[in-house]
Image (spheres, rainbow, N blue to C red):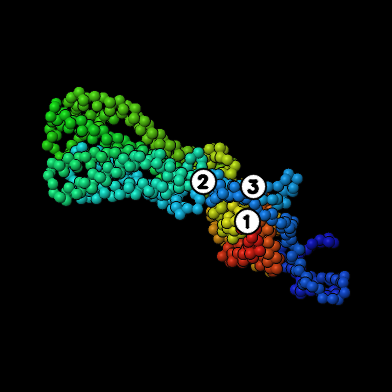
Amino acid sequence: DTYEPGELLGIARLQSSRLEGGSFSGELELWNSGLRTEATLSVRVEMLASNSEPEEPVAPLVSEAFPLRQLWTASTQVAPLRIGQRVADSWAGCPVTTVASRDSKESATTPGRMRTVVNLTEAMPTNSCWRRFIHYPGHPGRLAWDIVGAVMIVYDSIMIPLQVFDPPETTVGVALDMIILIYWTLNMPASLMVGYVKKGMTEMRPKMILWNYLTTWFTIDALVVIPDWIFTLKSLSENSENEGAGQSITLLRLVRLIRTFRLVRLLKLRWILTMVNDLLSSEYASILVNIAKMIIVLVIINHFLACFFFLLARLQLDKRPTWISEYGFADASWGYQYLTAFHFSITQFTPASMHVQPENSVERAFTICVVVFALVGFSYLVGSITNSMTQLRSMTEDASKQFWVLRRYLKQHKVPPSLGLRIQRYLEHSWARQKAVVAEPKLFALLSEQLSQELKCVRSLPHLKVHPLFECLHQYSYVSLQRLAVNSINWRNLARDDVLFFPNETATHLYFVVEGKLLYSKVDPSGLESTEEVDRAEDWVAEPVLWTPTWIHLGTCVAVSEAALVLIDGATFGNIIGRSPPMFQLVRSYARKFMQWVNEMPIHKLSDISQGEDISTRLQAFIDEAQHCLEPSLQR
């Protein structure tokens, strides 16, 4: 090979801690491409000072290869954060977001003065003993409680109308009625332990929650629960005293009549089902649940109509002919009476028929009303079910058609089989992921800027918190993470065997693995190749790019399976952090300690990969040392 004068052949690392006068001979290792070349270098060192001892050892030459970005070498002072006493008193306990402001003349990389913004999207309670018991509307515990309530509402909607058939009392039935009564009694104070959303604001103040409950569901709950308790306790006391059978039967009927008011809670069932449906992330599962819901609604409607049809006939038994007396159902068991009435109700919704027919004007008028209702209601339910079935079929047909077109395209353009197989395999994986992942709704265009930032931040945060520094940012400056999510964080997908970067490429981003696995390989100066896996929730790639502009990739990183990555732009990261002076000082201190550690590392130990289980303790020590110096500023 031929080299021009002044051409850089490689990096020589001095083994001694000081330079002596004269010349010396050393060994030059060309570790690029895994080649090793020995050369004798004659270096002239001119001492610019006397032979006095230097105050500090000369830094290794490798330190010159990774200088800090200019941003992290700057200095800044944190302006004290002042919050007006009137604001602090009015919004005590509210979430306070610290953001930075600067004059238009200031540089984009110069941290400005701090200002405070009160987050008005959440009205939090003041220092109250009830705060620890109040949950957000979507809290898992509250959702589980509401699901239990939905089951009890469905139970009541079935059992209460059945009381017109006078089914015998059973121990299980009595116990379930008592459990339901206790549940709805406890639900009254439980309703005061959850916030509510009004005009886009989550209200968490106890007084406002109490007022909202008193003006909405309290009256209905009180009218249902209080009389239910009164008649239930009186019924139990009279049964224990063995009073007259006639009086006990009358009281029992009153209790059953009072319990019909429980059906008002069917109004709650809709939003409970909506919350449960939100838990489903698959469109396929959501469609199946919607079909099941339509069928259940149809059955419950016919259940109510069947019970009412029997009640009409029973009230007229001694006055005029009814279907019960005319068709010989007066002495039948209550179960057979119910099944017959339910069969009659179903036939009014479908073209089917049966031998039981209305026998008086009241029953005939009721049947006409049911037929008219069925003409509209049943058509709506059947249309919804048909539409859902069509969606299921179209999902399957669309996938088959798309992949059929793909295979034709690959064959027509004579794509090599190996490449075509990789393309098809990756697209099958992406298609399956697309079905499981919900696309971004168009409604997001209506979100405010702050809500949009918070949403993007929440999406990325779980993957960033693998790194101790981002966990610290989450604790002290959540607004900085929000800005990073909008201006510096991107997402990238990789197919199997896709290359993320090659050796000697200039690094531009810090990478976190969200899904899948990467394989990193590097050739050391002696020509030996080493490999290591990059796992999600453990490792990250190319962190030095955040702190130095001269970092180049030292190896090759390849996706061993379909992967998704979160990328942080190294060029814009510092500018965003610089908008928060306290966090800027902390991150700057961390950057200096990190790069000092990297520069002191032997060349053969340098790597693009940061194994979290190996270095997290060291990085946390850097952060703790910076926090100790900046704790007053961070507390402000």
The reply to whether residue 254 is visible in this rendering is yes
User: Callout 2: few (<14), some (14-19), or many (20+) C-alpha neighbours within 10 Å?
Assistant: some
For mark 3, give the secondary structure.
helix
Q: Residue at x 76, y 63 (%)?
A: 64
Residue 4 falls in which quadrant of the image?
Answer: bottom right
- Seen as rendered, the residue at the extreme top is 361
Residue 314's place in the image compared with 116, above or below, is above
> Is 523 rendered above or below residue 434?
below
The residue identified by callout 1 is 636
Considering the image in quadrants, where does the C terminus appear? bottom right
Q: CA distance from mark 2 to mark 3?
A: 28 Å
Asked whether residue 457 is in view, the answer is no
Badge 3 amino acid: Asn
Quarter residue 340 falls in: top left
Type of amino acid under label 1: Arg
Residue named by callout 2: 123
User: Where's residue 397, x and y in %?
Assistant: 45, 38
- Report the Cα–Cα distance between label 1 and label 3: 26 Å
First in residue order: circle 2 vs circle 1: 2
Of the numbered discs 2 and 3, the one sitting upstream in the chain is 2
**Residue 216, x across and y down, in percent:** 40, 39
- To which quarter of the image does residue 155 belong? top left
Q: CA distance from mark 2 to mark 1?
A: 22 Å
Q: Position of residue 231 (x, y in %)?
A: 23, 44
Q: Amino acid at mark 2?
A: Ala
Q: Earlier in the sequence, mark 1 or mark 3?
A: 3
* Residue 25 rendering spot, x and y as whole percentages: 81, 74
Which residue is tagged 3?
487
Measuring 36% from the left and 30% from the top, which residue is drawn there?
380
